[in-house]
Image (cartoon, rainbow, N blue to C red):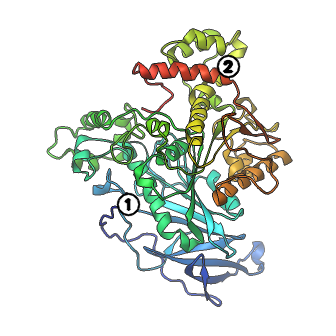
Amino acid sequence: MVGGRRLPSPRREDAGRVSRPRRAGRASRTREGGGAVRRVVLCTVICAWAALTVPVLAQEEVRVEIDAGELAGVRQGGITMFKGIPYAAPPVGPLRWRPPEPVAPWARVRAARRYGPVARQPGAGGPGMVASEDCLYLNIWRPAQEGDSRPVMVFIHGGEFTTGSGSEPLYDGIELAKQGVVVVTFNYRLGVIGFLAHPQLTAESTHESSGNYGLLDQVAALEWVQRNIHQFGGDPARVTIFGESAGGSAVSLLMVSPLTDGLFHRAAAQSGAVRGVSTLLAVREQAGVRLAEAVGCAGRPDPLRCLRARPFEELAIAAARFDTGPIVDGWLMPEDPRVVYAEGRQHDVPMIIGGNADEGTFSTLGRRTPITTVADYEAYVRGSVATGADEVLARYRAGADDEVYQTLNRFDTDRGVARHARQHGRWVSAGRAPTFVYLFARVSPHHRWTRLGATHTAELPYLFGNLQFAARQGRLSTLELADRRLSQAMMRYWTRFAETGDPNGDGRPVWPAYADDETLLVLDGEITTGGWPRADGLDLLDRLFADQRAAGVTDASEPR
């Protein structure tokens, strides 16, 4: 059901079903999170090396009943986990490029111990990863201890709306759940599968819309949470959506969609503050027509049937020449979100907004032609702004080649993230609900990527409490006490916000609500408050890009 409209869905044999296992030991029927749960203790004898027997280990299975059937998750280390839960029907075959439909119920117990497939995307298929268009699955972590309904935190992953998943190890929700919340992650359709528009797709839609299927998946996941999260001990009246990068942008867009009214009650946009979405449905439809031509479907009697039969690889190659991502579709997103925010018509809920101090260094990782000289840098700036390049070069000045790297970082950080976050904070804080703005600035002295600074995504290991994951990936060679303290503080700020709408409490440094003085919480080795770095540069960029928009020129840092 999307936007209050429930559509029929075909039944399918569920590959994830398992027969009800034989129970070793005694099963007890209890209540967990408001739902009937059977705890089954499965005792297994494991033989060690040299055929020596070790003590019996108890693995506890947890069952819960949801609207589609019964699930079997697992309890481990004080946390109960359910993974690979389908929240919508597989969007394959005739359901490719359609709004998500309800999942077919299953009759037997469905195993929910492993992640479901991730969305099809370039480069997917690493160790243990299965990619499929059948990707609409979510995962839940919750404290094993029974108690009152807990706040719910739903994370939306990033990846430019073309890559990523909710099952990446970095997003493991165990540590966040230990803070007393229910954590949800999920996959959604990406790239050409998630964001293709075409005149005939629009014509077959009862809403005369196409193109935002990946966002419609996100709406469907939130609807699922409203229907089912109480069975996992979650409070459907305290749902927080939070996301990073494209996930943060998605949060910003869901804040203005009429389809999400009442589906969440707080929001956090990390490195994904609201930007312009200037691409209209008609423009993206023409890109869809050209894609159909590129894969040989344009001249067919039924182009959609042809497109739906084309393999993903062929579509992805053809789509590389076109823009993807959210558009103004007239349904989920009726108009440019900047207009909605500027007029104060967004959902008036408490919000966290922020970014990282060195967002700009992230782009150096994928830049085909490195920018290493003053001449390279000046050419880059002149290509980035339609007017006022001399003013920009005077404010963001690189006097020698060895100054280019950091100057470019500052320019890209301010142009691509900081100015959007500042404006977003101004708009949202004008409403009744409080707004809290942060700057993540921590660069551990033991960070192996120290030259990148507090780059894009750097806050995520801290927020999820997964610093050991960062260490295993070579991002931190040694974990300092300051890093652990910062991680703990960030988890408490975010989970307290999910609980009450205010991140303050528990003796942490006060995070002031955003106001005219534009005070930020600075998350570093020591947590402090301060203002925007290079505020005069942000003022300059705001003025120049406002002039560009008035002249009909789109900023390259904004989605089109």
- Which residue is pictured at 84% across the width and 45% down the height? 482
Side (left or right) of 88 relative to 292: right
Q: Is 186 placed above or below 37 here?
A: above
Q: Is the C terminus in the top left, top right, bottom left or bottom right quadrant? A: top left
What x and y, as percent, mark residue 172? Answer: 64, 57
Q: Is residue 451 above or below residue 380?
A: below
Mark 1 and mark 2: span between their CA atoms? 47 Å
State the residue position of label 2: 407
Q: Secondary structure at mark 2?
A: helix
Residue 334 location (% of width, % of height):
36, 43
Query: Image point 65% across, 14% down: which residue?
Result: 395
- Dot 1, how many residues are within 10 Å of its Cα: few (below 14), some (14-19), or many (20+)? many
Horizontally, is 327 left or right of 412 in the view? Answer: left
Foreground residue among 243 and 44:
243
Locate the N terminus by quadrant.
Answer: bottom left
Asked whether the beta carbons under mark 1 and mark 2 sit within 8 Å of each other, the answer is no
* Type of amino acid at the residue the image marks with label 1: Pro
Query: First in sequence: mark 1 or mark 2?
Result: 1
Q: Quadrant of residue 40?
A: bottom right
Three-letter residue code for mark 2: Thr
The answer to whether residue 531 of the structure is visible from this angle is yes
Q: Nearer the viewer, residue 106 or 500?
A: 500
Q: Does residue 116 appear anywhere in the picture?
A: no
Q: Residues within 10 Å of mark 2 (few under 14, many from 20)?
A: many
Q: What residue did someone put label 1 on?
A: 90
Q: Which mark is residue 274?
A: none
